[in-house]
Amino acid sequence: MKLWTPARMILFTANFPIFSRMVSSLSFTSSLQRISGSSFVDNCSNTFFLGGNRSYRATQCLSSGKNNNSRPGKTDHLRRNANMNMKSGSGPRKIRNRPELYRADRVLANRGWGTRSESSEVLKQKRVKVQREDGKTELVKGPSDRIGMDDPIFVDGKKVPVIPLLQVYHKPKWVLSVMNDPKGRPTVKDSLSDFHKKQDLHPVGRLDYDTSGLLLFSSNGGLTQKLLHPSHDISKEYVAVVEGIVDDEKLKAQLQEGVETGEGTHTGELLEVSHLPETDSRDIWKTLRETLPQEYDAGDLEKRGYLKDNNDEPLSRVRLAVSEGKHRMIRRMLANCGHGVVLLHRERQGKIVLGDLEPDNFRDLTPDELEWAKSLVPTTGKKSKGNKK
């Protein structure tokens, strides 16, 4: 009978990986057996030596009280190590309420002042100052100095803007809520400044091509998901000009019960109804026809029922709130209630209101709006560009 020499054993385990795992586990077993006695192996080998997380299995065995031969103190370090490996995450625990500090060159580059190397160079030249929490301004000595991501920074005395968590944009009608369009139509990207482009701000959802109003731009992907997903029940408020004389009670009941569309049944809350004077209705129809983009054929739209030539048809203005935002959902809901949408405008999303912001312009959040937005930022998962470590 041939003896199992070390060389023969290595060859055998290389061809059969399952035996390699067994040999490795047995080696670990023998070490524990020397420390805590044979009963440890007898009690635990069936549950942990043929795969799985060794630390986890070791913890089960060490805490089971079955090891009668173990001597006090001999396995304490194994128990501590196993318990540490079972904890979620790795590395040292973070200290709560401790301000996050980052390399100065990284903060400067993340704000779009320049590349990482350009930021490093200007810091070496001692041209950068930072304002601390106590209001005092001090010189940043070099690229490796640690500062807060949102600390006020000045290069040659000029303040470097902080990356905004959200910005409010008034999207005009006949502008696409995308960054690029293969047909060459106007997009929101055309309105972005160099600062916005450097920060990689992205639109929070979309507004239809023929819809105007509030469109948020975000630098935090987790916040964007919170604002968009219907499970978070973030209300969006719209004002629509619709065809016909609206019956308040009837439309309110229809929206509360849910309106069936091609993409499912959707509910809404009717907030206000008013009937437009005849002169206003005529002006709206006239403006709609005159401002129609070149890619649309007015005659074709009339045949398909999207554009009316009857300037005497009465119009109503309705204000409603919904928590979903599917493609053309508001238009489909109101049309299925018997009132085709002529104009649609979004005025509010959550606690952020468009206000008197002019079309094709941006503004920062108010303190109350910013506080609300920060309360929605996920505490775990991916961080925004401005909060990266």
Image (cartoon, grey):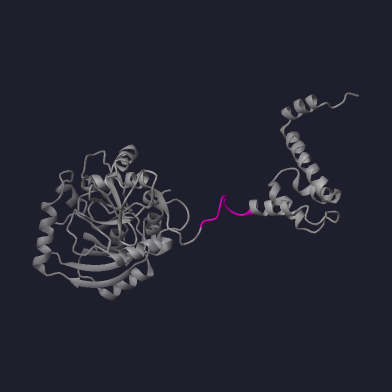
Toward which corner of the image does residue 240 lie, by quadrant?
A: bottom left
Q: Is residue 311 visible?
A: no
Where is residue 242 shown, x and y percent of the image? 21, 64
Viewer can see residue 379 = yes
Name, please, the residue furthest toward the bottom.
249
Identify the image quadrant of the N terminus: top right
What main secondary structure does the magenta stretch of the protein show? loop
Camera-side residue of 97 and 272: 97
Q: How many marks?
A: 0
Q: Residue at x 23, y 60 (%)?
A: 344
Rendered residue at 15%/67% (across/down) = 314
31 left or right of 270 in image: right
Image quarter of residue 272: bottom left
Residue 111 locus on image (x, y percent): 31, 47
Magenta residues? 86-94
**Measuring 23% from the left and 68% from the top, which residue is drawn there?**
318
Q: Is residue 153 above or below residue 330?
A: above
Residue 178: x and y in percent read 28, 46
User: Residue at left 56%, top 52%?
Assistant: 92
Q: Nearer the viewer, residue 176 or 356?
A: 356
Front in this rendered view, residue 47 or 328: 47
Residue 93: in magenta span: yes
Q: Nearer the viewer, residue 171 or 145?
A: 145
Q: Position of residue 269 (x, y in %)?
A: 33, 70
Q: Is residue 21 magenta?
A: no
Residue that sits furthest to the right in the current view: 1
